[in-house]
Amino acid sequence: MFELPKVLKDYLKSRRVPPMADFINSSTFYSELDYQFINYMTQVVRPCIAYGAATSDLNINSGLSAATGKAIIDGATRLVIGDKVFFEGDDRTVEFFSDIWQENTQFINFLSRAERFKYLGGSSICKINTDSNGRHYLSAFRIDRTLPSFDDIGNIVGCVFFISILNNFNRTNESELQYWLTEERKYNKNGDKVIVYKVFAKGGVAQSPTLPSPYETGLRFDTLPRAIQRKLTDMGVAVLNEEIALPYRDGLGIWKLDATPTNSCMPDVPFGDPLLFGALDLLWSIDVVYSGSMIDTLNGEGKVIVPGQFLQQTLARLQQANPNWEWSITTGELGQFGSENFVYLMPSGFDKERQAPLPVQFDIRADQYREMWELYQKEAVVRSGFSPTSIFPHLTPDNSAKTATEVTAEENLTRASIRQAHLLDVPVFNRMLKEVAYQERLSDEIELKLSDYIGNKLKFDENVRQNYASGLLPHETAVQMVNGLSVKETQDYMQKIEAETKETAFGAKIYDNSDYFGG
């Protein structure tokens, strides 16, 4: 746990300016963890989430942060999702997902949440939902908002979701309570797939709320304030504490996305490693460097050093003006002025060259701090599996000449990480899409296609064209790769090109400088 240096604590306390930080409330979740599991979640997942969210939960990451961890998480999420998302499969199903479902359910936002939560905690939990209008959509949860159970191959056989806090703002003692809504999906005693909604009143204090075990019986619907009942109805929750049959074909309609195939700390835990797990020491070092630069900035106030005779002269004049008082002036009493940067007047009779006040300016060392900061940033990004410039374009480039092998190695690092993410994620996303298609009474021949990382776009396009010119790539494949199109889009593209080529070949009228203006 990183703490502020004392000089910064004293400065912030005296100026009454706290460092900027957000607050992550995880106390309720961690209070429900199994004792064998809580060490892993608190010592691995919790600090990774704190650094990845650039926040403080008053326990982890409570220092001045440069938000490097959050930038790495955001950059990795953008790179994995890519510039374009499209679908392939049955024509009618693809048309529905591309033209109707994707926009209506904000599928891109779901992908961003799922990938970001996966990198924050090592795994994210996704589920399919059905709203009151019968529409099916997907949602993603951070690992510290769920309590899942797994079978031997990693399928989820039960899970509790901490959905939200329901607030009631009526000004009565009863309705000032806050209520937690939880959702549990499980197999009941008969082996049927069911879902159970429960509501619990918040306990504890404002800074540390607590929640009874979500496996206990919650409050009855008719005992809740009317405002809470309306909120539950608006969310599509009409029954509490009762089992409702789930219509989903693929298990409980819950899936897990993993950042890595295995867990480095606990091999038996069915979760991946958080993206920042191997770089926590570097992120802490970045905080230290950042705090050091702040200390230099605070110490950078100009100081003035004066000879001791100045104080003696001042003391003599004070004693002469007030003979009945006792005077004792030391350098420590200069703090009473509120600042040491006040003007000293040279009394007469002093040698101005030998005993003149000496101004001192502390060196802030900005260049040295920037070099250290960027060095730690580069290493943290590399440990996370990406090339530094793909995450931080602002990094100072290395002016030394790089070989083609070095440049290729940097690009391949990011490309390999994104390819591994696609290999782990796309099959899981396809299971979700097939379940949505099944619920929509469509063919489940549907697959998600995420664009690969291409690094330098100009170099990539040039390489594709050279391969096509050499006869190593079909024309259709080259068009698809250069323009980032799906198979169907590429076929439509090729048909238009062929039609235009035929029109030109048979002497179709082509505009020139004369007939363009109707001449």
Image: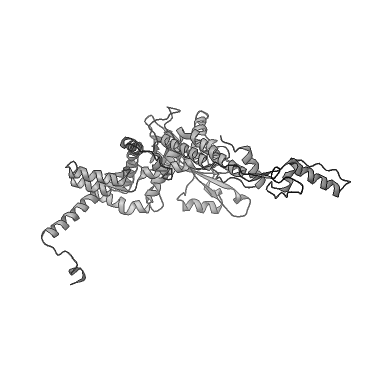
Toward the viewer: 510 or 269? 510
Q: Residue 93, can we see it?
A: no
Give the quarter of the image for residue 8: top right
The relative height of residue 179 versus residue 500 in the rendered view (above or below) is above
Toward the viewer: 514 or 75? 514
Q: Position of residue 431 (x, y in %)?
A: 33, 41
Residue visible at 58% across and 40% down in the picture:
58
Query: Left of 95 or right of it: where is 507?
Result: left
Which residue is the extreme one toward the bottom? 519
Q: Position of residue 386 (x, y in %)?
A: 39, 38
Image quadrant occupied by the C terminus: bottom left
Which residue is the extreme one toward the left? 506
Which residue is the extreme one toward the right? 324
Q: Position of residue 322 (x, y in %)?
A: 86, 48
Toward the viewer: 260 or 147? 260
Query: Left of 220 or right of it: where is 391?
Result: left
Query: Left of 457 or right of it: where is 347?
Result: right
Query: Left of 394 or right of it: where is 471?
Result: left
Q: Residue 366, can we see it?
A: yes
**Count of labels shown?**
0
How is colour applied across the structure in the image?
Answer: one colour
Residue visible at 77% across and 43% down in the picture:
311
Image quadrant occupied by the N terminus: top right
Q: Position of residue 199 (x, y in %)?
A: 52, 44
